[in-house]
């Protein structure tokens, strides 16, 4: 457990005892082509939803660019790729009381 950060360790604690460890940890970040972004007039990463949408629209105007933004359309990773966007926009996959 020496390789785990405090947040990961805390996720497996119960009653002040370590009862588990995360099986899988993944971090999602935005990757984008800075060269294409610069051609589209962007010198920084988008800071919010509105900027992300605007950047994607602007990048589509660059010659040879078909998609301004790409998310995995199918397969196991499509759910994981979409989840951070849904959660950061207020989505819940279960009820707040965790009963449904």
Image (cartoon, helix red, strand yellow):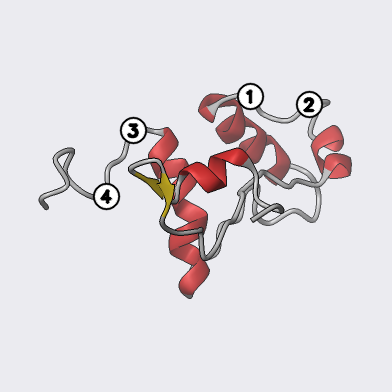
Quarter residue 41 falls in: top right
Instruction: State the SS at label 4.
Output: loop
Of the two numbered discs 3 and 2 on the same chain, state the one appearing first in sequence.
2
| Mark in the foreground, 1 or 3 | 3
Left or right side of 60 for 49? left
Q: Which quadrant holds the N terminus?
A: bottom right
- Residue 44's disc is 2
**Mark 1, residue position:** 47
The crowding category of the residue bearing disc 2, from other C-alpha atoms within 10 Å (few below 14, some 14 to 19, many at least 20), is few
Mark 1 in CB contact with mark 4 (< 8 angstroms): no
Q: CA distance from mark 3 to mark 4?
A: 10 Å
Instruction: State the SS at label 3.
Output: loop
Left or right side of 85 for 64? right
- Residue 93's disc is 4
Q: Position of residue 45 (x, y in %)?
A: 73, 30
Of the two numbered discs 4 and 2 on the same chain, state the one appearing first in sequence.
2
Q: Residue at x 51, y 59 (%)?
A: 22
Mark 3 in CB contact with mark 2 (< 8 angstroms): no
Q: CA distance from mark 2 to mark 1?
A: 8 Å
């Amino acid at each position: 457990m020496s390789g785990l950060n405090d947040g990961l360790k805390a996720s497996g604690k119960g009653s002040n005892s370590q009862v588990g460890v995360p099986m899988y940890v993944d971090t999602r970040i935005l990757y984008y082509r800075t060269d294409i972004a610069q051609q589209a007039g962007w010198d920084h990463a988008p800071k919010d939803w509105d900027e992300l949408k605007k950047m994607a629209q602007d990048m589509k105007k660059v010659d040879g660019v078909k998609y301004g933004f790409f998310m995995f359309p199918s397969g196991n990773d499509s759910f994981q790729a979409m989840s951070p966007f849904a959660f950061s926009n207020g989505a819940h996959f279960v009820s707040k009381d965790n009963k449904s």
